[in-house]
Amino acid sequence: MSWLKTRIVARLAVVAALAALTAGCFQPMYAERGLDGGPGLRDKLAAIEFPPVAVPNGSREARLGVAIRNELMFRAYGGATGAPPTHKLVLNLRTSRLSVIVDPATSLPNIENYGIDATYRLVEIATDKTVMTGSSTARVSYDIPGQEQRFARQRGLRDAEDRAAKVIAEAISTRLASFMYAGT
């Protein structure tokens, strides 16, 4: 029995030694300074400009564009304002709605899916060169309770839009942080 205990202790010692050797290889993504002593990720994200999304004023997409832009700015700057911009994010949106379940008696939808397809590109301001492109998709569903509740469909749609906008903003900000940290 002591042979088995000795073997387990030896394995644990090897694992601990390997962990100690690699402990200095990692750095938090949001550290104050980079590995080379340069600016940290927060400073790099603060130098991204988020221009308004090019959508028709007064449309549902305009409200979504503002919501996504505000969420991106908050994720990049926090409660502060941005630094002098070195990059700008150009964002395009496309929305869709799809009836998933239709009531056979009334031919009215009971459940709908709402989707946002966003394409974006990060442009270096000094050279006007696109340094990163990407796309993000969000699909959310919402219920439409019977005809007795007149505004339930509109409220459900608006709530679905807000949830989809948050998903899009989270995906884009994660991709931006990855690009600014790693440079690829």
Image: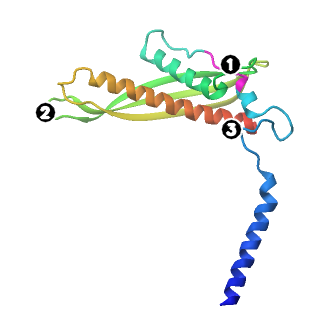
**Residue lying at 58% horizontally and 15% vertically, measured from the top left:** 52
- Asked if marks 3 and 1 touch (Cβ < 8 Å), the reply is no
Q: Mark 2 points at which residue?
A: 105
The percent position of residue 171, horizontal first and vertical second, equals 57, 35
| SS for dot 2 | loop
Q: In this view, does 20 lie to the left or right of 174?
A: right
Precedes in sequence: disc 3 or disc 1: 1
Q: Which amino acid lies under the numbered mark 2 shown in the image of this protein?
A: Ala
The percent position of residue 101, horizontal first and vertical second, equals 26, 36
Kindly report which numbered mark, 2 or 3, lies closer to the viewer in this rendering: 3
Q: What mark, if any, has residue 178 been given in the picture?
A: 3
Precedes in sequence: disc 2 or disc 1: 1
Extent of the magenta region: 46-51
**Residue lying at 61% horizontally and 29% vertically, measured from the top left:** 75
Choose between 14 and 69: the one closer to the eye. 14
Please identify the quadrant where the N terminus is shown: bottom right
**Residue lying at 66% horizontally and 32% vertically, measured from the top left:** 176
| SS for dot 3 | helix
Q: Distance between the residues labelled 2 and 1?
A: 54 Å
